[in-house]
Image (spheres, grey):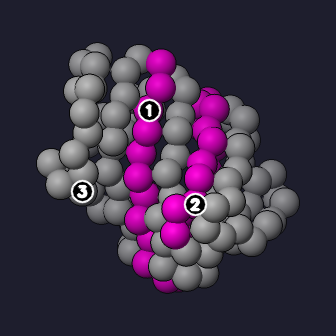
Amino acid sequence: MEQSKEFILHNEIPVETVGKGVTRQILGYNNDIMLVKIAFEKGAIGDIHSHPHIQTSYIVKGKFEVTINNNRQNLEEGDGFFVPGNCLHGVLCLEEGIIIDTFTPVREDFLKH
């Protein structure tokens, strides 16, 4: 696996559509950690899913209904959440927004696109 560059310029990173109203940019990674920017249109859904990676997320902009293990909480700019590995979670975007996700280890499935 290739290690990311030292400096990350957002306008040089490809934007990929990963769902209706949802785009993703991989900001940086190595074998141990990955930083990802996810942009959501109002009403867009990050489907309920799980993965073995530990995830912590920061809401940069917008409002989201976040579900973790059937617990729901409305979060907004400045809030965050933590998802243990293999835990069901997802989001509903209530107001156009951006979430920064950090994963450990790297999400190799994201790199196969």
**Residue type at the position of mark 1:** Met
Asked if 91 appears above or below 42 in the picture, the reply is: above
Would residue 56 be found to the left or right of residue 110 on screen?
Answer: right
| Residue positioned most to the left | 12
Q: Residues within 10 Å of mark 1 (few under 14, many from 20)?
A: many
The overriding secondary structure of the stretch rendered in magenta is: strand
Of callouts 1 and 2, the N-terminal one: 1
Foreground mark, 1 or 2, reads 2
Is residue 53 within the magenta segment? yes
Looking at marks 1 and 3 on the same chain, the residue that comes earlier in the sequence is marked by 3
Quarter of the figure with the C terminus:
top left
Q: Which residue is mark 3?
A: 15
Whether pointer 3 and pointer 2 mark residues with C-beta atoms closer than 8 Å, the reply is: no
Q: Up-down: is 17 above or below 68?
A: below
Question: Is residue 82 shown in magenta?
Answer: no
Of badges 3 and 2, the one in the foreground is 2
Kindly identify the residue that appears in the image at 59 percent across and 53 percent down: 58
The residues bearing labels 1 and 2 have C-alpha atoms spaced at a distance of 16 Å
User: What element does badge 2 sit on?
Assistant: strand
Tell me the CA gap for discs 1 and 3: 16 Å
Q: Over which residues does the magenta segment extend?
A: 32-61
Query: Who's the residue at 70% across and 50% down the image?
Result: 81
The amino acid beneath tag 3 is Val
Looking at the rendered structure, which numbered label has been put on residue 34?
Answer: 1
Residue situated in front as seen by the camera: 28 or 65 = 28
Residue type (three-letter) at the residue carrying disc 2: Ile
Question: In this view of the protein, can residue 41 be seen by the observer?
Answer: yes
Task: Report the front residue among 95 and 60.
Answer: 60
